Image: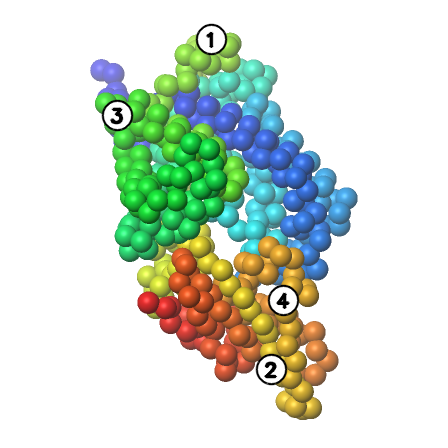
Amino acid sequence: MLPAPAKGPSRRVSIASLVAFRILFGLTMLVSTVRFVARGWVDSLYLEPTYHFTYWGFSWVQPWPAFWMYMHFILLGVCALCICIGFYYRLAAAVFFLSFTYIELLDQATYLNHYYLVSLLSMLAIFLPLHANASLDAKRRPSLRRTHVPALYLWVIRGQVALVYLFAGAAKLQRDWLVEANPLAIWLKAHTGLAWVGAWLGRPEVARAMSVGGAVFDLAIVFLLLWRRTQIPALLALCGFHTITGLLFPIGVFPWLMTACALILLPPTWPQGLLERVGLWWSTTHPNTHASAPSRVCMLAFSVYATIQVALPLRHHLYPGDVAWTEEGGRFAWRVMLTEKVGDAVFRVHNPATGATWRVRPEAYLTPLQAKEMCVQPDMLLAFARFLGAREAMPVEVYVDAFVSLNGRPATRLVDPTVNLMKQHEAFAPKTWLLPAPH
């Protein structure tokens, strides 16, 4: 009697969509790396600043000297190409993950949700056999070739992509986004000069409709792509949505990355015909044509990973106040395009021994991007205050007058101006020196 077919995580599915994910992810990262270097961002973001806002516990991560920084990006591009074509794939994925994450840890001022997503996807790619077909590795080593893999491998990537959309949609279910249509209304007013559509973009009802539509899209697109009856209109909506956001807003490679990643939600066989036509698909007769079932350790590891990815975006509920104002628990939570924050900060340094007090403008030490981000991020304000205090030969007190405007509201104090920030330390505990958000 033949054994019953495997079910659940061990059920066999075509590897075709995972292969397409590998190719598109590697290609997107290659183009993004070339674009990053060509636009001079290596210099402006990592070499020109004299001070970097490192993450808590990662102050030891510092930029290379100029020559090696550029070599680092060349290595990143080479690894992205190797991922795309499946050449020494696992080594390339591991080096890419470490290299890319190193860059992201250099400065909090450069944090973007999609950069965080790239680090996560490249880390997952190390452990998944995405090179088992349509790759140079599979061409060189026929014994590596697979046509099917356990469904768990597919759902690991699907789950990560789905979490981005679902948490982004859930975060939009609040008054500013749905009722006031902010910050979308603020951003659309910058495009009223466009031909044909400019006059419409400035209308409040258009901003409100686009805000509601954005929330519905994020919450529904995963299910619509997974359901066979709605896959074609959902795919059209996916391409249209990300194309429009990519053209209207300066969010870099994010729309194109998400479009490429979301294709993993389609049936796993969708790209197989295309790969066969271009001669990149091997329907091998090798006895190892199916990858072995995932071990218990593998399933446990992915379960722990999934738990962490669900818990991290929810951690802001452990802190008092509005996360859009305090930013506590705001990073690594897929809170995409939810706030327009403009701030200004002046630091007051006081020497108790001499009684002298002087003011410091952050622009004297920071680049425009760093100063802009720091003025609205409490942990960066604290880091810079401690940096100013550490520069002095004698113990000093450092205070800050920080005013922030959230989604078009009048500027309001963010930090208690009577608190000496030299006595405060970055930790998981709530920042008691933050003032309440304006109503």
Q: Amino acid at mark 2?
A: Glu
Residue at 55% x, 28% y is: 27
Residue at 44% x, 70% y is: 412
Q: Which mark is residue 277?
A: 1
Q: Amino acid at mark 1?
A: Arg
The span from disc 3 to disc 4 (Cα, nearest Å) is: 52 Å
Which residue does the numbered mark 4 point to in the structure image? 362
Asked if 39 appears above or below 435 in the picture, the reply is above
> 10 Å neighbourhood of mark 2: few (<14), some, or many (≥20)?
some
Q: Amino acid at mark 3?
A: Thr
| CB contact under 8 Å: marks 3 and 4 | no
Closer to us: mark 1 or mark 2? 2
Measured from the top left, where is residue 189 in percent x and y? Answer: 43, 46
Of pointers 1 and 2, the one earlier in the residue sequence: 1
> 10 Å neighbourhood of mark 3: few (<14), some, or many (≥20)?
few
Which residue does the numbered mark 3 point to in the structure image? 230
| CB contact under 8 Å: marks 1 and 3 | no
Of pointers 1 and 3, the one earlier in the residue sequence: 3
Of pointers 4 and 1, the one earlier in the residue sequence: 1
Local SS, label 2: strand
Q: Amino acid at mark 4?
A: Pro
The span from disc 1 to disc 2 (Cα, nearest Å) is: 69 Å
| CB contact under 8 Å: marks 4 and 2 | no
Which residue does the numbered mark 2 point to in the structure image? 397
Asked if 307 appears above or below 95 in the picture, the reply is below
Measured from the top left, where is residue 302 in percent x and y? Answer: 39, 42
Q: Is residue 126 visible?
A: yes
| CB contact under 8 Å: marks 1 and 2 | no
**On the rendered structure, is 22 left or right of 209?**
right
Of pointers 3 and 2, the one earlier in the residue sequence: 3
Residue at 56% x, 55% y is: 109
